[in-house]
Image: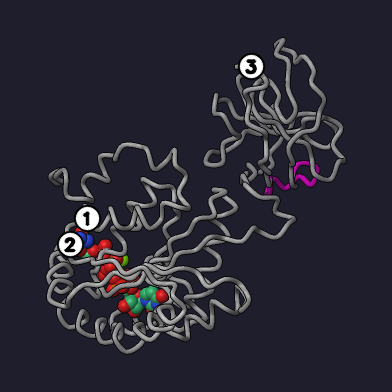
Amino acid sequence: MHANDLEPNTLFIQVSGAGLPEVDGLFVPSTAPPVTSESGTVSSLGYWNGKMAWDRADGRGERSPALSYSNSYTSWRICRLDGHLAYDITCEDALPPTDREWHVYKKGVPPAPSVVIHHFDPREPLPKPNVVFVLGGPGSGKGTMCSLAATQLGWVHLSTGDLLRAERAAGGPTAAAIERYITAGELVPNEITVTLLKQAMETSMRRTGRVNFLLDGFPRSLDNMEGWYEIFGRDAELPRMLHFECPYEVLEKRILGRAKYSGRSDDNVQSMKLRFDTFKAKTLPTLELFKSKDRVVEVDASQSRVDVYELVRSSLQAYTDPALAAQPLTERSEMQLGLRPYPKRG
Ligand code: UP5
Ligand code: MG
């Protein structure tokens, strides 16, 4: 590939836990001038040996780039402050691996470091996300449609219900409380939900660089909305909302259909009724607020999945990357849309 075809290197890398202060730290896109490497490859700005490369952010390293790829050894390498190699990992990955252990170079016993790639400079505040709230009764298809928009259109799907269930499964100090509220079909207190949501949005933006968010099942109450304002400020533009409208009988039928495989403690007739009551009492006032500010797109969610998805796709179109929108449906998306059967379980 010609050097001019390379995308600019805009990534940041955080190395931590090496136990070597001369290795741990933040690495920024390399500013080393173009030069011919040991394998004869001419580098370009931010690159070394045809792959992205980084310098230490504190400028204290002897070698530039300090984190780069070696063609001769087909390995990624991290230097110590004195310029000697500290860690390496043999592979041809385009970016330094973040999911495997790095080897201590030649000798020594320090632990493998944790390597995290950031899409925004971690020293700067994050950019403003572009948020669309997705509300609708239990079983209205929020999860299904948001998941399709994530796979097909590149939106980040965050379901507050899923975040709460993951937190419950992690068994932290709030797990028991979350379990009580969910099974009773009631709303989990704001401090828990809004904190999880904020963390998930930040982590996702840093790790993926994506700023288009579908927040599935939020805000479920005016109280949730207060929590939102506390994080994003009252002056920020009110997000838009997709409202999935669907009669109760259809919702009940879908939830009971899903109960056969979902394993959810609230997928039963009794919890379903309580969830729907909570939706009417707590969530509909939020919807009214958004309607009064003209921020709602109504989606008739009782239609077929294909028709509902078409409405969702067109409402998100203005903010969707056209190249992603033009992709054919994946097999999984076809299954989610009911266009292809799910594989039989063995
Ligand atoms: N299906 C989907 N679309 C279909 C269509 N068009 N035609 C035919 N079938 C369709 O869909 C449900 C089922 O219907 C699936 O089998 C699907 O294949 C089929 P799904 O996409 O799962 O619907 P969804 O709207 O996501 O339903 P869900 O049950 O997840 O909605 P809830 O709002 O009840 O659940 P959530 O996970 O958001 O919240 C659970 C609990 O967490 C809440 O009750 C509450 O206790 C707590 N919570 C909070 O306290 N605060 C929060 O902010 C969020 C949650
Ligand atoms: Mg859901």
Residue type at mark 3: give it.
His
Q: Residues within 10 Å of mark 2 (few under 14, many from 20)?
A: few
Residue type at mark 1: give it.
Asp
Does the Cβ of the disc 2 residue fall within 8 Å of ligand 1? yes
The residue beneath circle 1 is 307
> How much space separates mark 1 and mark 3, taking CA atoms?
45 Å
Q: On the rendered structure, is 317 left or right of 211?
A: left
Residue displayed at 73% across by 20% down: 43
Which mark is nearer the camera, 1 or 3? 1
Instruction: Assess whether residue 18 is covered by the magenta stretch.
Output: yes
Instruction: Assess whether residue 10 is covered by the magenta stretch.
Output: no
The residue beneath circle 3 is 2
Earlier along the polypeptide chain: callout 1 or callout 3?
A: 3
Residue furthest to the bottom: 281
Residue 62 in view in this figure = yes
Which mark is nearer the camera, 2 or 3? 2
Residue 303 numbered mark, or none: 2
Disc 2 on helix, strand or loop?
loop
Residue displayed at 65% across by 44% down: 113
Residue type at mark 2: give it.
Gln
